Amino acid sequence: MVISVKPNAISKKFFNPEQIESALAAAAELPVEDAENPRTDSSDWDNAIVSYSYEELKEKLAQKQRCDPQKAPLKVATTIRFDADVLAALKATGKGWQTRVNAVMREWIATHPRGS
């Protein structure tokens, strides 16, 4: 069985050479800079991870995650039981509800000395 494929069967040129030449001539020599698109400098790339394969990138990212010091104090996983309606109301406040509960508990602890 012989399968024949037409060369460039899916390649279609959208612009003729004159149009391409005209666009290149009209293009600015340097990229346009503005407040939303400032030019980068070498310090922007200080923490860049360079890799030449997907496997190497995965390994470098895993190593970086192991080495980076934790930015926030360590949170401790625990189990707490709420009434269903209380939990539903907390979750209804949206993403970050656990962080907000933590803040409220911290405030309560600060205003209620031990033994009170």
Image (spheres, rainbow, N blue to C red):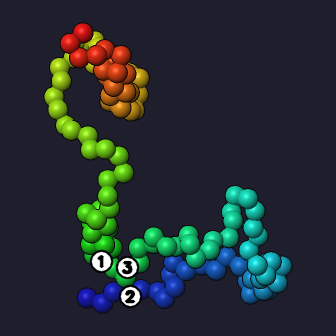
* Residue hosting label 1: 56
**Residue shown at 18% from the left, 24% from the top:** 80
Could you tell which of marks 2 and 3 lies nearer the N-terminus? 2
* Residue hosting label 2: 4
Is there CB contact under 8 Å for labels 1 and 3? yes
Return the x and y of residue 46 as percentages of the image width and height: 49, 73
Is there CB contact under 8 Å for labels 1 and 2? no
Return the x and y of residue 100 as percentages of the image width and height: 38, 27
Question: Mark 2 is on which residue type?
Answer: Ser
**Residue shown at 56% from the left, 72% from the top:** 43
**Residue shown at 31% from the left, 72% from the top:** 60
Rendered image quadrant of residue 75: top left
* Residue hosting label 3: 51
Tell me the CA gap for discs 1 and 2: 39 Å
Question: Is 29 placed above or below 48 here?
Answer: below
Whether residue 38 is visible to the viewer of this picture, yes or no, is: yes
Nearer-the-camera pick, 70 or 9: 70
